Image (tube, rainbow, N blue to C red):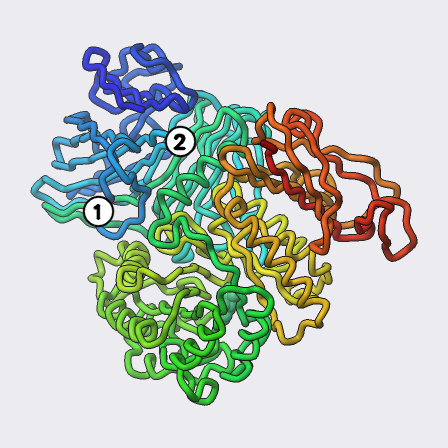
């Protein structure tokens, strides 16, 4: 890995053998993007890839120009990466090269911006290019970090007003990327509550296309990530790009096809409802975007994003630790519980093999329903007469960890906090405040509010032995306004809210470094790379239906690692869809995530408890591969009739792999099928054990890695058997009926 500077050509080449980015100072001082993507040879100048003798857009015809920091008003009419308004109201600035630095490692971003990091100088190199707009005194610093082992570049932009007059930043993208052609399809991850991150894959057309959020959080409607793929790119072959934004608030992610058939990708803060004034001497920094390139298909692209997010965005004691199997009481009790009931559930959970008990919403204030008490973070003496500490200690005495739900950014109108501080709530004075789920949002742009909540939650976490926190956020922001900001700074509000959230995360994670944080927002409404910097796992969706989860976890896996995706087995009929899927099928799906249960274990029959014990044991034995292995998508629930899904996880050295195949509905007389897998050692022999329930596996067979990858695992048709199931001649349970699955455990033989 290195960043080469060629002073004669005035070109930088960021390269690591996996990807190359070539930037250049164009003859007019602008910053050009000559290449990004496939690795190119070092020691060669690439100026011929860019515009010839580019001196601006005067009388220019017929030649596309790749720019690394596009601005408006100078002849490039595509979407800009940066818009700054000068004191005279003009929005024309012309950033020209001033200086650059090549640094070993990766400097942190200023303030509270979450960002990827390098643990030492050998892991990454960073290029910082300073650009100046002389008339205004605006200094821009574009930062590009290339990682040694991944085809990933982290990009962000800082700016400082070194001039005499006030400037206003109106658009500040974390990244733009100019690609020389438009032969791409755009994939975004969209949906709604309970059906988050469904891949939406379409051809790109002239003009702009993309997604964004103006909800005050990244949202369940669209995710701050996107993929560009060639029309012929598949999971296992072909070129593609992925971009993720390390930010949890309003965002924009889009692609624009220009009239010369070029594509400009941009991702960053949503420019609407945004304006950041820069007084003389002041500075501003964008969040970070991570841009990954793959020449080997979509699963390889995802694997790179998973690596950077799991290993170099997530941090803290839990980053690499085995995540505990949890049981959450929410769907088991909702608000209806007390000390005795929770202890009984915890005891039953322990008997299931669960390692962490999570007490969800309803433990504080007088919270018998969702219309009150948010903000009053004191245990409800009616439900928990011995206090939270006593409950936590009793649960822990059973040999479990204890976790707690909080929703620190919210307040109920019916709460002591709201009665004492109505002015701490987001809203425009004199106007109606829109309620959602009967709650209001605290003004986290006001540091006094963050101080108060840090104190109140800090007291809760210090007052009981708490090992895990589920941090929820159950509504979007309306009437965005903070009375603590002057009128001409209200455009900062949304950013400041998100920075306030990060400030609370920083304080709590610093004060309680042993706690495992899981972010949550009505399920997956703030499932983004920014959150992963504070909370290494997130609640993927409120939809726990196993069939829906196949689609949700498939879509989420494009950008996010399995170690970040909370996935629970819940009761049937499922509370979101009413579907009744077998217990083992539900578990086989949830294992491809951070595994847990969300039901009342005291309501399970003896047979079900025995089944759950087997599931937990199966998962625990394979947890390291499932949580930290390389994930590959094999068969999409979005293709064909969506009846089948297959995916796999393999250890980095190919010595162990877990492959899952799911079939939702049984079809009559199905044919014999083969499922080729990936990431094995082609020269090795593997012991292959297939589980169609967690009761007992089929007899282990031996196969070559070459055969398993070239021909595949056998997805056998159901054997003839009496209606209702049966046992085959060799003793295995026969597979027939809806909701069948096969989990193949592959071990390399010595
Ligand atoms: C929404 C979350 O996604 C659920 O898991 C649960 O914690 C509820 N909020 C509690 O109000």
Q: Quick one: quadrant of the C terminus?
A: top right
Name the foreground residue: 627 vs 684: 684
Q: Which residue is mark 2?
A: 150
Expressed as whole percent of the image width and height from the top left, the position of residue 311 reads: 39, 43
| Left or right of 571, for residue 278 | left
Relative to residue 374, is residue 525 depicted above or below? above
Residue located at (45% from left, 75% from top):
397
Quarter of the figure with residue 466: bottom left
Name the foreground residue: 179 vs 568: 568
Q: Which residue is mark 1?
A: 110
Expressed as whole percent of the image width and height from the top left, the position of residue 178 reads: 38, 26
Residue located at (42% from left, 80% from top):
364
Name the foreground residue: 78 vs 95: 95
Give the crowd class for mark 2: few <14, some 14-19, many >=20 residues within 10 Å. Answer: many
The answer to whether residue 546 of the structure is visible from this angle is yes
Quarter of the figure with residue 475: bottom left
Assign a secondary structure to mark 1: loop
Expressed as whole percent of the image width and height from the top left, the position of residue 313 reads: 36, 45
Assign a secondary structure to mark 2: loop
Expressed as whole percent of the image width and height from the top left, the position of residue 234 reads: 59, 29
């Amino acid at each position: 890995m290195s960043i080469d500077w060629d002073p004669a050509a005035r070109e930088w080449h960021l390269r690591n053998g996996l990807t190359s980015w070539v930037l250049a100072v164009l003859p007019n001082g602008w910053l050009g993007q000559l290449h990004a993507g496939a690795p190119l040879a070092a020691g060669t100048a690439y100026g011929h890839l860019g515009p010839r003798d580019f001196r601006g857009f005067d009388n220019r015809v017929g030649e596309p120009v790749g720019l690394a920091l596009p601005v408006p008003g100078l002849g490039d009419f595509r979407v800009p990466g940066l818009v700054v308004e000068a004191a005279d109201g003009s929005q024309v600035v012309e950033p020209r090269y001033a200086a650059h630095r090549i640094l070993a490692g990766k400097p942190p971003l200023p303030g509270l911006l979450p960002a990827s990091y390098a643990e030492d100088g050998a892991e990454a190199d960073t290029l910082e290019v300073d650009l100046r707009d002389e008339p205004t005194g605006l200094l821009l610093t574009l930062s590009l970090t290339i990682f040694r082992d991944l085809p990933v570049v982290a990009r962000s932009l800082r700016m400082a007003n070194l001039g005499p007059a006030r400037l206003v930043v109106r658009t500040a993208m974390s990244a733009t990327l100019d690609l020389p052609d438009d032969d791409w399809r755009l994939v975004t991850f969209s949906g709604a509550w309970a059906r988050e991150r469904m891949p939406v894959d379409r051809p790109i057309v002239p003009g702009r296309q993309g997604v964004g959020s103006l909800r005050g959080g990244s949202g369940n409607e669209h995710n701050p990530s996107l993929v560009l793929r060639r029309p012929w790119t598949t999971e296992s072959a072909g070129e593609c790009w992925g971009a993720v934004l390390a930010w949890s608030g309003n965002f924009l992610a889009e692609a624009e096809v220009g009239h010369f058939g070029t594509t400009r990708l941009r991702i960053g803060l949503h420019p609407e409802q945004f304006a950041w004034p820069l007084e003389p001497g002041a500075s501003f920094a964008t969040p970070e975007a991570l841009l990954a390139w793959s020449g080997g298909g979509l699963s390889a692209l995802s694997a790179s994003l998973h690596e950077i997010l799991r290993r170099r965005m997530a941090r803290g004691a839990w980053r690499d630790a085995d995540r505990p199997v949890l049981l959450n009481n929410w769907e088991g009790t909702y608000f209806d519980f007390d000390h005795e009931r929770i202890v009984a559930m915890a005891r039953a959970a322990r008997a299931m093999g669960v390692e962490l008990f999570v007490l969800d919403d309803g433990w504080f204030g007088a919270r018998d329903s969702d219309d009150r008490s948010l903000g009053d973070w004191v245990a409800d003496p009616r439900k928990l007469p011995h206090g939270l500490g006593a409950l936590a200690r009793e649960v822990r005495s059973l040999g479990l960890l204890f976790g707690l739900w909080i929703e620190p950014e919210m307040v109920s109108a019916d709460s002591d906090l709201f009665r004492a501080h109505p002015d701490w709530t987001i809203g425009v004075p004199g106007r109606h405040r829109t309620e959602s789920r009967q709650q209001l949002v605290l003004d986290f742009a006001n540091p006094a509010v963050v101080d108060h909540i840090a104190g109140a939650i800090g007291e809760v976490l210090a007052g009981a032995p708490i090992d895990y926190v589920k941090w929820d956020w159950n509504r979007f922001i309306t009437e965005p306004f903070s009375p603590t900001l002057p009128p001409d700074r209200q455009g900062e509000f949304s950013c400041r809210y998100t920075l306030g959230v990060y400030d609370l995360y920083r304080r709590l994670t610093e004060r309680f470094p042993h706690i495992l944080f899981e972010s949550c927002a009505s399920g997956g409404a703030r499932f983004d790379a920014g959150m992963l910097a504070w909370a290494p796992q997130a609640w993927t969706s409120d939809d726990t239906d196993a069939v829906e989860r196949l689609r949700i976890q498939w879509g989420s896996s494009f950008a996010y690692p399995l170690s970040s995706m909370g996935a629970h087995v819940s009761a049937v009929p499922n509370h979101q869809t009413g579907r009744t899927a077998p217990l083992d099928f539900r578990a086989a799906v949830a294992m491809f995530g951070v595994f847990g249960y969300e039901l009342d274990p005291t309501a399970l029959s003896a047979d079900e408890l025995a089944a759950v014990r087997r599931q937990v044991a199966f998962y625990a034995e394979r947890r390291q591969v499932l949580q930290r292995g390389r994930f590959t998508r094999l068969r999409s629930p979005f293709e064909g009739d969506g009846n089948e899904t297959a995916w796999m996880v393999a250890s980095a050295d190919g010595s162990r792999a877990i492959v899952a195949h799911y079939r939702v509905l049984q079809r009559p007389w199905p044919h014999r099928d083969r499922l080729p897998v990936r990431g094995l050692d082609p020269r090795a022999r593997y012991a292959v054990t297939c589980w169609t329930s967690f009761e007992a596996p089929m007899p282990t067979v031996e196969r070559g890695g070459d055969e398993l990858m070239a021909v595949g695992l056998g997805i056998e048709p159901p054997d003839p058997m009496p209606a209702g199931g049966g046992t085959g001649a060799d003793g295995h349970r026969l597979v027939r009926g809806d909701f069948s699955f096969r989990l193949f455990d592959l071990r390399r033989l010595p």
